[in-house]
Image (cartoon, rainbow, N blue to C red):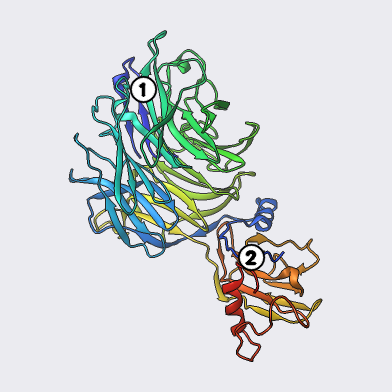
Amino acid sequence: MSIRQIVFTHNGDPSSLRTNTPSKGCHMYLTSKLSITPLLTVLTLASTFVDAQVLNETQGYEVPEPSHFFGTSIGVSDDLLAAGFRDLAGQDSGIHLFDLSTGLLLRTLIPTSASQISQAGRDVAIDGLTVVCSERGNGDLSYTNPSVFVFDALAGQRFEVVPDPDDNSGGVFGLSIDVKEGVVAIGSALATVDAGTGFQVGKVYLIDENTGARLGTIHPSDAPENIGFFGSSIDIHNGIIAVSANQFNAGILLGGNTERVELFDLATQQHIRTIYSPADPIDPAGFGFDIAMNDQYLVVAAPWHDHTGVNSGAVHVYNISTGDLVSTLEIGESTNPGAGSNSLSIQVDINDDGLVLVSQSGGSIQKAAIYEASSGVELAVLEPSYGLIRLPSDTNAVALSDGSAFVGIPRFNANLSGGSIDQSIVFKHDSNVSIAVQPQSLVVDDDGVELFMQVVATGATGYQWYLDGVAISDLDPNFTGATESTLLIVSGPEVEGVYTVEVSDGPLSITSDSAYYVYRGQGTSDCPPDLNNDGVLNFFDVSVFIQTYTAGCP
């Protein structure tokens, strides 16, 4: 994904363009999932009767320097939150790395280069320990030293990527960046001048995240168009790279809307399909302003689409395999009265379970909410429990990770009276559920006995039990209550393993501690009952089982 805002003042001169960044085979493993299919089904069926849930923040990420402006671009991976920052005092710029659990600032990555560095924190991406940021000045074509910097989160800067010698993008080199699957993708939206037409055409650089070697280049599959901004947003997922061309361009002036998202094979750079804006040809929708994918869906933001009213904006969801439109999210029903032409920003992210996080900023709208991709139904609204989001605000970045949603707020006032200094902050939002009693482990001797594990949670409306990280179904004769607080288990060796339960009260969820089912069986078995050889059969034998489970019983 990319985090930025594009403003186009058309006077026939490209230099007028400016951008603002806004078996019991003994495999023991645990996974933290966000799958709440049963609950989502209920919410979808009752969508006309149930108001969206309000989720307040559970964690804030901020720095002591009030001049550090961030929240327009964030990324989450493993235990880290990356937030690109710019010092409003004109000093350093780069990336803040926060501990995801504690909110503490771990370190700050500052790029170094032989050339001048200006505003390097406009765009960021993170995957594992690889962190990327672009440096492109004020984002206009006159900027002469754009770069993209690649870091190791622990060891510091790895290398710098500069444009090709004939790249004319200036401050829109690195307008969008992403890093996944070992590849750093860099959008250069006005990279080359087409020899036949003289049009400025974008491209995408593909770089090895460890060595900096050039892996390939992606060019638009359609006929060249002038100032089409191909590469203005990028997302990589599961061997596919999506690239948008979203800028109001000469094609629209001639009556043909060329705003689109193109899908390519990441390894071969072969074109897969193109998805065009559903907006009216004379409506510059900004289709592809931001994009995000999971295995099934492509989510496309169109902040300037006159969908339900002037400047109302829209978010469309497409089937990746077919290109068919699946839904349009219910992000608004009327005109955005405070948004001038092309001033609304929409950022999106999607997780593996089809939850879409959307932020709207610009004009009078400041909103972050979670939606169901398949239906477009709004499930939850994310709001700070205190303070004030200052208007007008820059782009509010978003990210979904495990059971949490993250929203960046570049201009936040902690004092409702407006007496304190504006600051930047990123808020983390979690489920309102809390677990009071964790499921307990079981040590079992006999076959065919019905036992149970139970979780006690406050405010929970949905449950899903897992065995060795795989969702349990009531269709399995060994289990009853797979989506209830109490799981009934028919004892036997086939149900031995590690149990967890996911608990939710809405679109987000939390996962319980692990409980272990140890089957000792009757008589002599491959696994001696007294596992720790202390002469007593009790729960201390469970700890020995845990240590040996992955390697098999002795």
Please name whichever residue, 492 or 500, is drawn nearer the observer in this view of the structure.
492
The quarter of the image holding the C terminus is bottom right
Q: Nearer the viewer, residue 214 or 143?
A: 214
Q: Dividing the picture into quarters, in which one does residue 178 lie?
A: top left
In the rendered structure, find residue 191 and report the number of the disc placed on it.
Answer: 1
Hey, what amino acid is under mark 1?
Answer: Ala
Residue farthest bottom in this picture: 535
* SS for dot 1: strand
* Horizontal relation, residue 419 to residue 38: left or right: left
First in residue order: circle 1 vs circle 2: 1
* Numbered label attached to residue 461: 2
- Residue 300 lies, in percent from the top left, at 52, 36
Disc 2 residue crowd, few under 14, some 14–19, many 20+, Cα 10 Å: some
Q: Residue 335 at what x, y percent from top left? A: 49, 36
Do the numbered discs 1 and 2 sit on residues whose CB atoms are within 8 Å? Answer: no
Counting the numbered discs, the total is 2
Left or right for 38, reference 235: right
Rendered-image quadrant of the N terminus: top left
Asked whether 259 or 311 is in front, the reply is 259
Q: Which residue is drawn at 48% across and 30% down?
A: 244
Q: Percent from the top left, x then y, of residue 478?
A: 78, 68
Nearest to the eye among marks 1 and 2: give it.
1
- Tell me what residue is drawn at x 46 percent, y 61 percent: 56
Quadrant of the rendered image containing residue 23: bottom right
Kindly give the residue lying farthest to the top in the view shown.
196
